[in-house]
Image: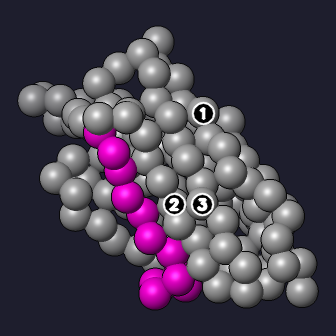
Amino acid sequence: QVHLVESGGDLVQAGGSLRLSCVVSGSIFNIFAMNWYRQAPGKQRDLVAGISIGGTTNHADSVKGRFTISRDDAKNTGYLQMNSLKPEGTAVYYCNLVRRDYRGVRTEYWGQGTQVTVSS
């Protein structure tokens, strides 16, 4: 059973920084791509950033230049460094792992989420 545990969410003032962590257990982390999503109250869950098995990253336009996704395969942990936080960044942030096997079958796992609240 694969488990993802996020941490690092907190209440922070606008302009502040937080680093979210996602610790993975129950599987080999380096066979998965990893993503961070966020969901604000009453809104859909949106992709914030992703990192491939090889380390290629992509970030949503709304966070480019402020957020950085990374991974440490030796520690089975992924990170989301968030700088210059804005009030609209208030949301529950979720870690997501995804892979496709040789048949193209997609498997994904989700964490329970961590709350980030940015005050103005």
Local packing at callout 3 (Cα closer than 10 Å; few below 14, some 14-19, many 20+) is some
Q: Residue at x 43, y 40 (%)?
A: 77
Queried whether the magenta region covers residue 70, the answer comes back as: yes
Q: Amino acid at mark 1?
A: Val
Residue 38 found in image quarter: bottom right
Q: Amino acid at mark 2?
A: Leu
Residue 87: give x, y in percent of width and height: 80, 81
Q: CA distance from mark 2 to mark 1?
A: 13 Å
Sequence-first disc among 2 and 1: 1
Res 19 label: 3
Residue 96: give x, y in percent of width and height: 48, 44
Q: Residue at x 22, y 57 (%)?
A: 55
Local packing at callout 1 (Cα closer than 10 Å; few below 14, some 14-19, many 20+) is some
Q: Which quarter of the image is occupied by the C terminus?
A: bottom right
Residue labelled with disc 2: 80
Q: Is residue 66 left or right of residue 18?
A: left
Segment tinted magenta in the rendering? 62-73
Res 5 label: 1
In the rendered image, is residue 23 in sight?
Answer: yes
Q: Nearer the viewer, residue 56 or 19?
A: 19
The secondary structure type at the circle numbered 2 is: strand
Q: CA distance from mark 1 to mark 3?
A: 14 Å
Q: Amino acid at mark 3?
A: Arg
Residue 84 found in image quarter: bottom right
Residue 40: give x, y in percent of width and height: 77, 64
Q: Residue furthest left?
A: 102
The secondary structure type at the circle numbered 1 is: strand
CB-based contact (under 8 Å), mark 3 and mark 2: yes
Sequence-first disc among 3 and 2: 3
Res 48 label: none
Q: Residue at x 82, y 71 (%)?
A: 12
Q: Is residue 45 left or right of residue 2?
A: right
